[in-house]
Amino acid sequence: MPLPITPLPILRPATRADLPAVLALLADEDRVVDPAGIVVGEAHERAFADIEADPRNEMLVLVEADETVIGCLQATYIPGLGKGGAERALIEAVRIRADRRGGGLGRTLMELAAARARDRGCALVQLTSNKQREDAHRFYASLGYARSHEGFKLAL
């Protein structure tokens, strides 16, 4: 008997209805947070509206066939004079739901995001990752990302 075909998750722009699920993913990397318990504050509403209105920003969600959000990331497209004037994609806030890790969904999320950036004409994808997240660093290296720069941040 043939095995049932499981539809692949899709990557799409987040909608306002996805906001509690996205905030649940961002709330805790190590456990599943129920989106029903997430309080969406005014600042979240404003930030999401700003992202949604900006053609150079996207909050993207990885969803299953039933529309369950299982991953997310934010992509910001940065114009530049280098690389022949091509845009670059900055990827941030990458998350896969804690109970769904280890099955290739992170790879799918990142590959779909890179394809989306390539289709847009971006010359490269860049990201930062906390120095303490060694597993994440191995994961990004397995996807072909190179440690090419040292990053700096200034909290304001």
Image: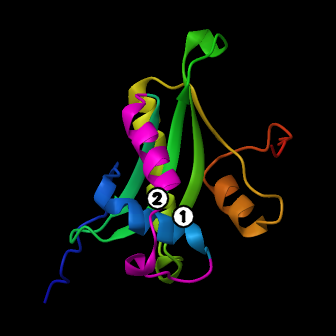
Cα distance in 3D space between marks 2 and 1 = 5 Å
Quarter of the picture containing the C terminus is: top right
Residue 67, percent from left and from top: 25, 67
Quarter of the picture containing the N terminus is: bottom left
Give the number of the disc on residue 72: 2
Q: Is residue 71 left or right of residue 69?
A: right
Badge 1 crowding class, 10 Å Cα cut-off, few under 14, some 14 to 19, many 20 or more, is many
Residue 124, percent from left and from top: 59, 30
Q: Amino acid at mark 1?
A: Arg
Q: In which quarter of the view is residue 16 placed?
A: bottom left
Q: Is residue 136 above or below residue 121?
A: below
Total numbered circles: 2
Residue 118, percent from left and from top: 45, 31
13 or 146: nearer the viewer = 13
Q: Is residue 109 left or right of residue 143?
A: left
Give yes or no for contact between labels 2 and 1 (Cβ–Cβ under 8 Å).
yes
Q: Is residue 39 above or below residue 94?
A: below
Q: Is residue 25 left or right of residue 29?
A: left
Q: In which quarter of the view is residue 35 placed?
A: bottom left
Q: Amino acid at mark 2?
A: Cys
Residue at 29% in and 60% down: 17
Which segment did they paint magenta?
Answer: 30-55
Q: Is residue 33 above or below residue 89?
A: below
Q: Is residue 42 visible?
A: yes
| SS under mark 1 | strand
Residue at 34% in and 61% down: 18
52 or 134: nearer the viewer = 52
Per the image, the residue denoted by label 1 is 95
Q: Is residue 10 above or below residue 127?
A: below
Residue 125, percent from left and from top: 59, 36
